[in-house]
Image: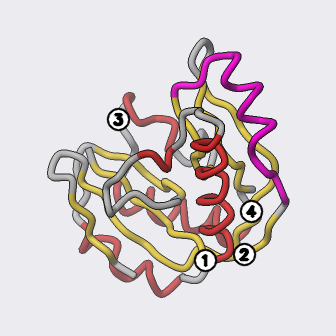
Amino acid sequence: MFSVELLPDPRIDRAVRSDWERLREAHLPSAGRNPSPSNRPHLTAAVREHVDPAALEDLVELLPLPLEVSGVVLFGRERFVLARHVVVAGALAAFHAAVARRLGPPGARFETTAVDRWTPHLTLARGLDADHLARALRAVEIPNMVGEAVGLRVWDAAAKAVTTLR
């Protein structure tokens, strides 16, 4: 599995990392608990069985992209993923569509990254139950932020390797 990831500017990165730390301090699940050096706040634009990073290299010319981070979004039913919502607008939507054109449609397993199904977000925590969720919402700060996506990378989950395009 490969994912195409946009990297936020330093201000948004710091805000997400601060929420990761607040969740850890509250003894809650946190995306910041992953010790891998490649673990950092990111916005997944596509997930596919295979991605050739060379097919995306010219998309770095579209960076930086404006990002608007607002509120939270939840995924799941009994176990939840808590994330910061990123508004799909203008240049970000066009970038996502360009990635999709290059990579082709996602398979059923990754259909949530299709152009008409995508919910851009910055993950704060995974595996929250209802009790954790209430506590997590009290622990994190949720300021609206306007910033930019300034980097692009491809994550190869099998190899646990990152190809940085910018």
- Label at residue 9: 1
* Residue on which the image places disc 4: 89
Residue drawn at x 81%, y 52% as measured from the top left? 142
Q: Nearer the viewer, mark 3 or mark 1?
A: 1
Q: CA distance from mark 2 to mark 1?
A: 7 Å
Label 4 CA crowd tier, 10 Å (few <14, some 14–19, many 20+) = few
Q: CA distance from mark 1 to mark 4?
A: 17 Å
Depth check: give the residue in front, 162 or 36.
36
* Residue on which the image places disc 2: 147
List x then y, in percent, for residue 163.
26, 70
Q: Is residue 96 above or below residue 124?
A: below
- Label at residue 107: 3
- Specify the segment rendered in magenta: 127-143
Q: Is residue 114 above or below residue 7?
A: above
Q: Secondary structure at mark 3?
A: loop
Q: CA distance from mark 4 to mark 2?
A: 13 Å
Q: CA distance from mark 3 to mark 1?
A: 30 Å
